[in-house]
Image: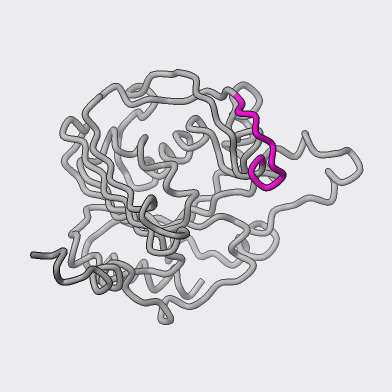
Amino acid sequence: MANLESRRQICDARGVPNVHVVYPSKPVVMTRFLPKGIRSGVDSLFERHYSHALNPKRTTVLYPRQDLIEASMTDQVFSRHDTHMTQIGNAIVAQKILDSLGNDHNIQACMKTGTRQRRGDLADMVKIPAQLPEPCLIPRQANLKIFNNDIFLPGNTDNIVVAHNPLSASSRRLLALGDSSLIGAISPLLTFYRDILFVRSPLFQPDLLNLFAPDDVVTANAERYLSQVYPDSAGESVVMDVVAQVPVSHCN
């Protein structure tokens, strides 16, 4: 809670709205698909240990578990062979982020539905080669620019995404800090934001408020990461660390 309150103070001092999202784990949303013998024993880590301690006057935290449960009755919100959500699930959470930050915008009205093939991280773990079809949402604007440095990384540490939509609904800029759960929200959020900077980090990066000058800030983590939380004071600048690793010859 100290991290969230500190982030709120830092952002408030700069006049920047901010919100934190806890992404519900797949089993607590899709509980009805679990074996009957264990369904009753599956509950939410966030709701059990964290939600009661939140002070809404000092922090704004979204936990869209119920929204995803309701949507799952008619739509596929999680990939079948993946721990992550489908693009429909991501759009639902992105809409909650926009609403919480006070931005009036209908994400799904700016996207069209389609279908894509997806394998998934769970399939990779058990070496299932099959790809399964799942619904997807595609922004109607065709000229989105998204740079993701993950193809140059051995893992997901130091992952940075820079995104731009010249036809966005607003000229606002969003700073997004979190794990891979939040990356899925970039495309739907880009229908509203002109520029988005995503930095993969469990800890806050206050230097980015000066470097990027965002209009809004969202931080996020997958629910499973709440089992071990470090103080923001232990964090280091991801962006400056990446810049320091670039050979001088590449900067000429």
Q: Position of residue 32 (x, y in %)?
A: 77, 34
Specify the segment rendered in magenta.
123-132
Question: Is residue 75 or residue 106 the one in the foreground?
Answer: 75
Q: Quadrant of residue 185?
A: top left
Residue for point 36% across, 23% down: 111
Question: Is residue 21 or residue 77 the one in the foreground?
Answer: 77
Residue for point 20% across, 41% down: 194
Q: Position of residue 33 (x, y in %)?
A: 77, 34
Can the viewer see residue 13 in this picture? no
Q: Quadrant of residue 73?
A: top right
Tell me: 187 left or right of 80. Answer: left
- Compared with 54, 197 (above or below) is above
Q: Does the magenta run of residues contain 110?
A: no
Residue at the outermost front position: 249
Can the viewer see residue 9 in this picture? yes
Residue at the outermost bottom position: 234
Q: Position of residue 96 (x, y in %)?
A: 44, 41
Question: Is residue 235 or residue 206 the one in the foreground?
Answer: 235
Predominant SS of the magenta segment? loop
Residue at the outermost left position: 252
Q: Considering the image in quadrants, where does the C terminus appear?
A: bottom left
Q: Position of residue 215 (x, y in %)?
A: 22, 53
Residue for point 21% across, 70% down: 247
- Compared with 169, 58 (above or below) is below
